[in-house]
Image: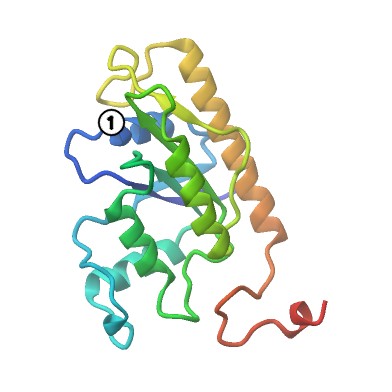
Amino acid sequence: MAPYKIGYFVGSLATGSINRVLAKALIKLAPEDLEFTEIPIKDLPLYSYDYDADFPPEGRALKEAIEASDGILFVSPEYNRSIPGALKNAIDWGSRPWGSNSFARKPTGIIGASVGSIGTAVMQSSMRSVLSFLDAPQLNAPEAYIHFDAAVFGDDGEVKNEGTAKFLRHYMEEYCAFVQRVLAANAPGHIGDLEPDTAKLTR
């Protein structure tokens, strides 16, 4: 069976982001059925509907990367109890113009690391509201709010604590199974379709 193509976002633009380290760890611990490609966000201009008639190359590349992915994984910090601005901007680009929401029906996972004890719980709550509106199915359990300890995570993604590695491995196994379930059940029709599925509208 061909691997599932997973596009992933790192919500921080910082070179030394602990969430980029977490992303490396997740990729190392993920099932072989998943193949990962980062979707970059740092060069996107701020979204405005003025661009809708003619997206810039960065916006088109983002949407093409999302649409080429079987599933999407968000690995992100929490800024001021919410979604980092650069990541929210990327989500806005991917959802527009109206009628071409690239996130629709893409199975998603949300995970993040913080040096704080509550991890990224509030950011993830905000993300769930956004992704629900975008018709992007979400892995709801297990939840993963990672307290980052530099003694546990190596820069290359090595996880030095077996309990942490076991949890992250389990999370990625559950995400893989979720991707498989969602893709098996997918059907046409989502918010913003230019030509909605009439069968769905009459149910």
Q: In the displayed structure, does residue 95 sit left or right of residue 139?
A: left
Percent coordinates x, y for residue 27 in the rendering: 41, 35
Instruction: Residue 5: tell me if it is visible.
Output: no
- What is the quadrant of residue 122 in the picture? top left
Compared to residue 50, the image places residue 57 above or below, namely: above
User: Which scheme is used to colour this image of the protein?
Assistant: rainbow
Q: Residue at x 27, y 84 (%)?
A: 50
Percent coordinates x, y for residue 26 in the rendering: 43, 32
- What is the quadrant of residue 78 in the picture? top left
- What is the quadrant of residue 118 in the picture? top left
Badge 1 amino acid: Ile
Q: Residue at x 47, y 78 (%)?
A: 100
Query: Which of the two residues, 44 or 184, is positioned nearer the viewer here?
Result: 44
Question: Quarter of the image containing the C terminus?
Answer: bottom right
Compared to residue 128, the image places residue 158 above or below, namely: above
Instruction: Residue 195: tell me if it is visible.
Output: yes
Q: Residue at x 57, y 53 (%)?
A: 107
Compared to residue 48, the image places residue 123 above or below, namely: above
Q: In the displayed structure, does residue 149 sit left or right of residue 33?
A: left
Query: Which of the two residues, 116 or 35, is positioned nearer the viewer here?
Result: 116
Query: Which of the two residues, 31 or 53, is positioned nearer the viewer here?
Result: 53
Per the image, the residue denoted by label 1 is: 18
Percent coordinates x, y for residue 180 in the rendering: 64, 49
